[in-house]
Amino acid sequence: MEWRISDGLTDYDQAVKCMEDRVAAIRAGEAEEMVWLLQHPSLYTAGTSAKEADLLDAGGLPVHQTGRGGQYTYHGPGQRVAYVMLDLQRRELDIRCYVAMLEDWLIATLNRFSLRGERRDGRVGIWIDRGNGREDKIAAIGVRVRRWVTYHGISLNVEPDLAYYAGIVPCGIQEHGVTSLVDLGLPIDMTEVDVQLAHAWEDIFAKKPARAIFS
C-alpha cells in the first residue's frame, strides 16, 4: 500500500475529490490502498449526523458539508489528518471491526508518547482522562465506505489552535473538552507524530510495510 505525506495545507474540496478518485481506482483494481497524511487550513466540516444548532459561531471559517459519518468537527494547522482508503472486502473486515482498528491505531500511537488514549461508550473518538472527572477528546474518527472501500478517516490534535473548537459543539458533545499533545505538555513535532503513526499502523493492521511518497 501507499503511505503519502503532503506538506503544507491541503484544500478540503480538493482532498475529497482525490479520495473519491482513489476509492474508485482501488475498487477497479487500478490503484493501491492508501493512507494519506495531511493538514487542512482552518475550517469546519459537518458530517451526516450534524445538527444545525451545533454550529455555534463559524467566525468566518468555511463550513463544508461532507459525506463522512459524525457531526461537526474542526480541521486546521497543527492537526494531523489521516485519510485511509482500504478495501475492506479484500481484507475481510466489516465496518465495525475497521472502526475499532482505527481506534486501536490512535491508542497505540498515543501510547508511544506515554499517553493513555481511551474509548468511551456513546462517544466517538479517543479520550484522555485529565483527572478529577475531566475528560478531553484528542482524536476524532469519521469514515465513509463506498462499495467496501473506505475513505475519510481520523484526526489527531498535535498543536492546533484549540480556541476554534468554541465555534462548534464538537461531535455533538457539550460536557467535555478538547485537548492536544502540546496542551498536554508534549511539544512533539509533526514529523515524529508521522513516524509513530506509521509504526503503530503496522502493529494494528499487520500488513506489508507502506511505501512513502511525499508531495
Image: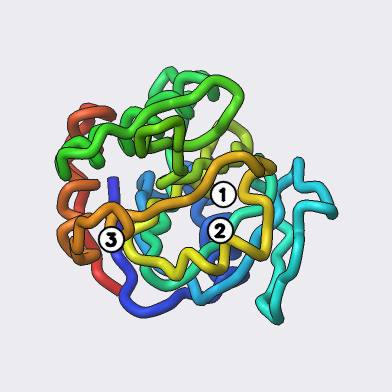
Q: What is the three-letter code of the residue carrying label 1?
A: Ala
Percent position (x, y) of residue 15? 53, 66
Circles 3 and 2, Cβ within 8 Å, touching? The answer is no
Q: Nearer the viewer, residue 187 or 49?
A: 187
Circles 2 and 1, Cβ within 8 Å, touching? The answer is yes
Q: Residue at x 20, y 53 (%)?
A: 211
**Between marks 1 and 3 in the image, the one whose residue lies nearer the viewer:** 3
Q: Residue at x 45, y 30 (%)?
A: 133
Q: In what element is the residue under mark 1?
A: helix
Q: Is residue 156 left or right of residue 208?
A: right
Circles 1 and 3, Cβ within 8 Å, touching? The answer is no
Q: Residues within 10 Å of mark 2 (few under 14, many from 20)?
A: few
Residue at image mark 2: 21
Residue at image mark 1: 24
The answer, for residue 36, to whether it is visible in the render is no
> Where on the picture, by quarter, is residue 131?
top left
Q: Residues within 10 Å of mark 1 (few under 14, many from 20)?
A: some
Q: Residues within 10 Å of mark 3 (few under 14, many from 20)?
A: some
Q: Is residue 116 left or right of residue 34?
A: left
Vertical placement of 61 versus 191: above or below? below
Q: Residue at x 52, y 39 (%)?
A: 150
> Where on the picture, by quarter, is residue 160?
bottom left
Q: CA distance from mark 1 to mark 3?
A: 37 Å
Q: CA distance from mark 3 to mark 2?
A: 35 Å
Q: What is the three-letter code of the residue carrying label 2?
A: Asp
Q: Is residue 105 left or right of residue 164?
A: left
| Residue extending furthest toward the right | 52
Q: Earlier in the sequence, mark 3 or mark 2?
A: 2
Q: In what element is the residue under mark 2?
A: helix
Q: What is the three-letter code of the residue carrying label 3?
A: Val
Q: Earlier in the sequence, mark 1 or mark 3?
A: 1
Residue at image mark 3: 182
